[in-house]
Image (cartoon, helix red, strand yellow):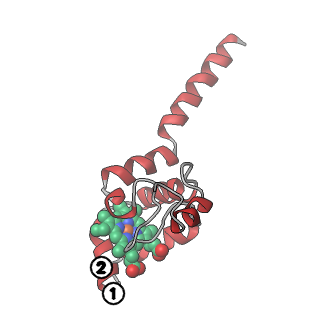
Amino acid sequence: MKHISILLVFVLTLYASNSPYNKGEMLYFTKACNGCHGVNAEGGGRTPRLANRTKKYLIQRLKYFKNAKVATIKQEMMVQFIINFSNEDIENIATFLSEHKKLQTRDVSEDLFGGYGS
Ligand code: HEC
């Protein structure tokens, strides 16, 4: 019994640090996404919010940029940041963004009315 619980703690620790969410979070900051989309993926005047969008939508958009078949200059800007992402990277970052823990969609509307961070 003791062995089983030690094993369980070990597996949980491993899972916590290597989960798709954590890997995605790491990518988000190391690949400079935060520079344009914000520290909490809240978006800004020129960039869309990414936090709490559906995973399916995010994956679809990122694959679209990765394939570099974009329609506008703004979209083209995104291509360089995503072109070297593997499908697994895209999956991980979409998990992180869609399950984003720090920003709730509600905070964004508060932001629009000057409530958040002002
Ligand atoms: C230089 C600024 C910049 C950086 C850095 C950047 N983006 Fe973007 N991103 C944009 C802009 C601008 C758009 C809006 C493009 C458009 O008009 O559709 C966008 C759009 C997106 C979208 C589509 C959102 C939607 O509403 O359709 C996703 C997803 C996205 N970015 C993810 C990322 C990720 C992940 C990274 C890091 C690897 C990243 N971006 C880095 C500027 C940036």
* Residue designated by label 2: 76
Q: Give, as a three-letter code, the residue at label 1.
A: Thr
Separation of residues labelled 1 and 2 (CA atoms): 6 Å
Q: Quadrant of ligand 1?
A: bottom left
Query: Who is closer to the viewer here, 79 or 32?
Result: 32
The residue positioned farthest toward the bottom in the image shown? 71
Q: Secondary structure at mark 1?
A: loop
Provide residue 64's location: percent of width, then percent of height: 42, 77
The residue positioned farthest toward the top in the image shown? 2
* Residue designated by label 1: 72
The residue positioned farthest toward the right in the image shown? 1
- Image quadrant in which you'd find residue 33: bottom left
The answer, for residue 102, to whether it is visible in the render is yes
Question: Quadrant location of the N terminus?
Answer: top right
Is residue 73 positioned above or below 19 on the image?
Answer: below
* For the residues bearing labels 1 and 2, Cβ distance under 8 angstroms: yes
Q: Give, as a three-letter code, the residue at label 2.
A: Glu
Is residue 83 positioned above or below 4 on the image?
Answer: below
Query: Who is closer to the viewer here, 44 or 83?
Result: 44
